[in-house]
Amino acid sequence: MQQREATSDLASSGGARGGQMALDAAQASPTPAIAATARILARLKDQPGPLLPVLHAVQHELGCIPASAVQTIAEALNLSRAEVHGVITFYPHFRSDPPARHKLEVCRAESCQAMGGDRLADHAREALGCDFHGHTPDGNFSLEPVYCLGLCAQSPAVMIDGRPQARVTPEKLDRIIARTLEATP
Ligand code: FES
């Protein structure tokens, strides 16, 4: 409700002055995502081509670009929500949901594929119950493809939370996933 009030403040204002006043009001919003987004917009909106820098800054600060931020950004930059949403979905880097607690990256490049990488990728999908670029329903793991981790001589390879793992079999992957879960607070 508070969020709706804050965004409608922004929507109902006309012209640059009204837009600035609405942005000032949004910075004081009790909804943290709106307030943070409005502060970023106040800093970046007047630079040339502000949309991408704003999206990067919002994701850096909030971990994702939530729907309330999309609304605030669209109104401040005089764009439609569909336009902002279109840019977010065009670039794989941007995400609308909070990141998973752990990131599993499976190498899909040639050397790993030649050493059982396809089987390992299938196993990762099955073990986590999600596809590449997706995440588990409990938010514990995201699954991403990666193209060479520099471990070609020890293929196939994966990376878990930035830590490379070499010569990974499906069984070893199960152990990596279980250990990671055990270590999750
Ligand atoms: S191809 Fe997988 S680590 Fe190089």
Image (cartoon, rainbow, N blue to C red):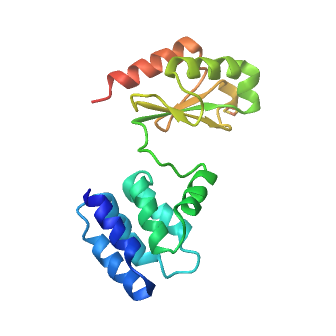
Against 116, residue 87 (above or below) is: below
Where residue 147 appears, as percent x and y from the top left, is: 68, 38
Q: Is residue 39 visible?
A: no
Query: Which residue lies at the image location 46% right of the left edge and 71% below the top edge?
Result: 75
Where residue 73 appears, as percent x and y from the top left, is: 46, 67
Q: Please tell me which residue lies in front, 116 or 122.
A: 122
Q: Quadrant of ligand 1?
A: top right
Query: Which residue lies at the image location 40% right of the left edge and 32% below the top edge?
Result: 139
Query: Which residue lies at the image location 53% right of the left edge and 74% below the top edge?
Result: 50
Q: Residue furthest bottom?
A: 17
Where residue 168 appears, as percent x and y from the top left, is: 59, 20
Against 19, residue 39 (above or below) is: above
Where residue 45 appears, as percent x and y from the top left, is: 47, 77
State how many labels appear.
0
Quadrant position of residue 20: bottom left
Image quadrant holding the C terminus, namely top left
Q: Residue furthest top?
A: 171
Quadrant position of residue 110: top right
Q: Is residue 125 visible?
A: yes
Quadrant position of residue 87: bottom right
Image quadrant holding the N terminus, namely bottom left
Against 28, residue 14 (above or below) is: below
Q: Please tell me which residue lies in front, 51 or 154.
A: 51
Seen in the image, is 181 located left or right of residue 105?
left
